[in-house]
């Protein structure tokens, strides 16, 4: 992903690794993000490299003395470059956080259904600490899904994620993780640079997360029928995309491992008892094990 704040006429366009004159992700003179097919820099392009992390550049130097002298001089220079890069990508980070932390018509019904389930569980067990429910919601969606997506875009897009890009994305992911936390982390001059980069933005991002959870809570409740319809539509749209037999096998392996706990939970829950889910699960087990379901 690339953007550039300024041109650098002295930059070697064939350079594909960080050196003492450049610092990381590929940028052009366009403000539009660019993803190349293989992540390489095309010859003849007037590019400059930026990073959100300190480059590992020992292999660029021919002797230990030069390397030692460079590393002694780099902290102040590198910090300036970090701040410059952070300022360049700030809008894109903000836009991304705004997109995933907005409760509108594009929000999947499953998110509202899940968050309501967590709120009900808190009331049922008399949990009054808001931090607990906040942590449940953070662990169920932002940290479970979005952080994984931020750190591993190659799971979805056909791109080459280099070690450098991986490190830079980890900085963004860590920022998002800190934004979902309610615990204050004291930072000082000895704190890692990746923590300091977005330190002033964390309070604002935390407000966005809290506001998102509140907005979802205020949305109309999703009925079981609406949830069933939404899941059916999702299943239809994904026909042929997944191996359902393999998916069911993996689910059954999990169910078998925790069968006692699952059956006990199904027997306790009033809705599950009404639907006879425990008995249905036992019938599934009997069928897969080759037993008569009538004897279960």
Image: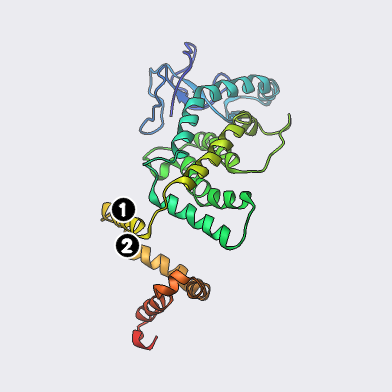
Name the residue: 28% across, 54% down: 233
Pointer 2 local density, CA inside 10 Å: few below 14, some 14–19, many at least 20: few
Task: Please give the label number shown on residue 234.
Answer: 1
Q: Is residue 148 above or below residue 16?
A: below
Instruction: Tell me which corner region of the image, top left, top right, bottom left or bottom right, holds residue 280.
Output: bottom left
Observer-side mark, 1 or 2, equals 1
> Position of 95 compared to 209: left or right?
left
Asked if 115 appears above or below 209 in the picture, the reply is: below
Describe the colour scheme in one phrase.
Answer: rainbow
- Percent position of residue 126, x then y: 62, 60
Q: Mark 1: give few (<14), some (14-19) or many (20+) Cα within 10 Å.
A: few
Is residue 173 in view? no
Residue at 51% from the left image edge and 50% from the top image edge:
144
Does residue 109 appear in the picture of this structure?
Answer: yes
Residue behind mark 2: 244
Front position in the image: 139 or 190: 139
Task: Give 206 or 242, whichever is nearer the viewer.
Answer: 206
């Amino acid at each position: 992903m690339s953007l550039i704040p300024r041109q650098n006429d002295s930059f070697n366009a064939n350079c594909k690794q960080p050196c003492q004159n450049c610092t990381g992700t590929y940028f052009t003179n366009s403000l539009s993000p660019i993803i190349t097919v293989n992540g390489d820099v095309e010859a003849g392009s007037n590019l400059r490299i930026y990073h959100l992390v300190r480059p590992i550049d020992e292999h660029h130097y021919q002797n230990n003395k030069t390397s030692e002298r460079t590393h002694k001089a780099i902290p102040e220079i590198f910090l300036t470059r970090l701040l410059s890069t952070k300022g360049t990508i700030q809008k894109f980070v903000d836009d991304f956080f705004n997109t995933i932390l907005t409760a509108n018509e594009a929000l999947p019904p499953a998110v509202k259904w899940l968050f309501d389930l967590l709120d009900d569980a808190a009331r049922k067990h008399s949990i009054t600490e808001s931090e607990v429910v906040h942590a449940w919601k953070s662990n169920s969606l932002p940290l479970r899904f979005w952080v994984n997506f931020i750190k591993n875009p190659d799971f979805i897009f056909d791109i080459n994620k280099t070690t450098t890009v991986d490190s830079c994305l980890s900085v963004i992911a860590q920022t998002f993780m800190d934004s979902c936390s309610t615990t204050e982390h004291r930072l000082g001059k000895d704190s890692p640079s990746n923590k300091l980069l977005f330190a002033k933005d964390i309070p604002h991002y935390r407000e966005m997360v809290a506001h998102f959870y509140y907005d979802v809570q205020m949305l109309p409740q999703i009925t079981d029928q609406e949830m069933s319809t939404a899941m059916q539509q999702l299943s239809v749209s994904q026909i042929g995309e997944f191996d359902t037999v393999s998916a069911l096998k993996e689910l059954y392996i999990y169910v078998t491992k925790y069968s006692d706990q699952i059956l006990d939970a199904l027997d306790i829950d009033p809705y599950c008892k009404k639907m006879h889910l425990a008995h249905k699960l036992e019938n599934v087990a009997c069928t897969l094990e080759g037993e008569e379901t009538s004897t279960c």
